[in-house]
Amino acid sequence: MRRILKTYFVSGLAVFVPLALAVYVFVWIMNFAESLLGKYIKPLFLEYYDFYFWGMGIIILVVVILLCGFIVAQYLGKVVHQVAERMLVRVPILGTIYPAFKEISRFLFREHAAGIQKVVMIQWPRPGVYAIAFLTSRVSENIAVAAGRPLCNVMIPTVPNPLTGFVVMVPEEEITPLPISIEDAVKIIVSGGVINGTDPLKPEPPDGPLAV
């Protein structure tokens, strides 16, 4: 009886934990998005229109984001955006924080523009052990000349946060391109290798030394 209950409990955890975490994160994101503008516009709507409902902050935030995207897509908007960025980077503290958050944003929402060219595999941290990495660029010519061979900048992401990791310079001939998308690579990294392939609900069965 105890073994049966243990089996049911473990099976229930396997279903409940990822579902609960997904719902928790989703609710947290929604509440965070609502609070960004909601705490400012709620008093105004209640004072002037005598009504407000949860989610209005999210709706207005989406409209603001779409409006920003539309403005930046226009020539004049691009010029204004560039001027505003130049002013921001000159402000103490903000000039240090803004570029970092900008790169994170580009990584999340515009992966190709962020400089990631492809998913690759390199031997790390020692020969015979392989790691998934992101090829970002070729090293500058002066560094390649100093090394005496062509090198590429490669980012090795860490688990479970692929936004952090190590940047190493790897010889071109030691880099192996992988036929997977950046999204699939991030899934593998975040899941700690549990998820393999394109279907997030079907981890690939183990083979080799893990086969049973």
Image (spheres, grey):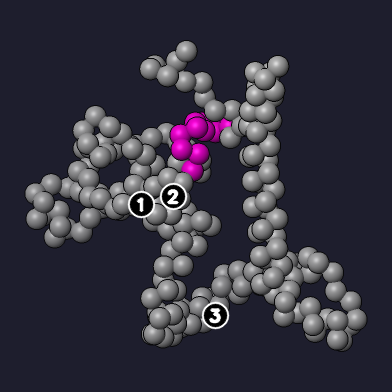
Check disc 1 and report its element: helix, strand or loop.
strand
Residue drawn 51% across the image and 21% down it:
205
Is residue 65 left or right of 107 when viewed as pictured? right
Q: Residue furthest front?
A: 2
Find the magenta span and give its range. 190-199
Q: Choose mark 3 or mark 1, whichever is in front.
A: 1
Mark 1, residue position: 165
Residue drawn 73% across the image and 74% down it:
38
Check disc 2 and report its element: helix, strand or loop.
loop
Marks 3 and 1 sit apart, C-alpha to C-alpha, by 37 Å
Image quadrant where one finds the N terminus: top right
* Quadrant of the image occupied by residue 70: bottom right
Q: Which numbered disc, 3 or 2, marks the residue that appears first in the sequence? A: 3
Give amino acid for label 2: Pro
| Mark identifier at residue 101 | none
Crowd around label 1: few <14 · some 14–19 · many ≥20 (10 Å): few
Q: Choose mark 3 or mark 2, whichever is in front.
A: 2
Check if mark 2's residue and mark 1's residue have beta carbons within 8 Å.
yes
Give amino acid for label 1: Gly
Reply above or below: 116 against 57.
Answer: above
> Where is residue 57 drawn, in percent x and y?
74, 70
